[in-house]
Amino acid sequence: MTLTVFKIDRSLSMKGCPYDNTITEAVFKIKKKEFINQMSFHRLQHLKLELNDNVNCYNKH
């Protein structure tokens, strides 16, 4: 399993505690608004390259 190889613990909230979903949905909303909706991608490779740059920048700042 990839998570085990990289020593990553899964985030599992308790039943009835949807805070993990809220954070994830907020991040996806930001991605859509600030990244995907403002660019046009002519090839899949272009999308992959830009998304990789965006994620790296987002994680480092």
Image: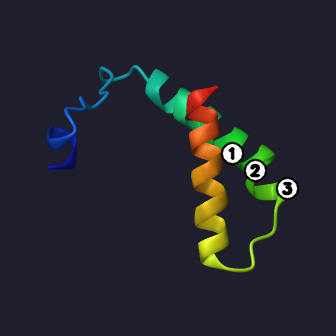
Q: Element type at marker 2?
A: loop
Asked if the residue at tag 2 contacts the one at tag 1, i.e. Cβ–Cβ closer than 8 Å, the answer is yes
> On the rendered image, what quadrant is the C terminus found in?
top right
Say few, some or many: other residues with alpha carbon within 10 Å of mark 3 (under 14 / 14 to 19 / 20 or more): few
Q: Earlier in the sequence, mark 3 or mark 1?
A: 1
Question: In which quarter of the view is residue 28 placed?
Answer: top right
Colouring: rainbow
Q: Would you name the residue on which mark 3 appears?
A: 38
Q: What's the residue at 75%, 79% (across, down)?
A: 42
Percent of width and height locating residue 34: 79, 44
Q: Would you name the residue on which mark 2 appears?
A: 35
Residue extending farthest to the bottom is: 43
**In this picture, is 10 found above or below 40?**
above
Percent of width and height locating residue 13: 33, 22
Q: Element type at marker 3?
A: helix
Q: Element type at marker 1?
A: helix
Q: Amino acid at mark 3?
A: Gln
Q: Would you name the residue on which mark 1 appears?
A: 31
Asked if the residue at tag 1 contacts the one at tag 3, i.e. Cβ–Cβ closer than 8 Å, the answer is no
Percent of width and height locating residue 22: 55, 28
Q: Nearer the viewer, residue 25 or 43?
A: 43
Percent of width and height locating residue 55: 58, 44
Q: CA distance from mark 1 to mark 2?
A: 5 Å
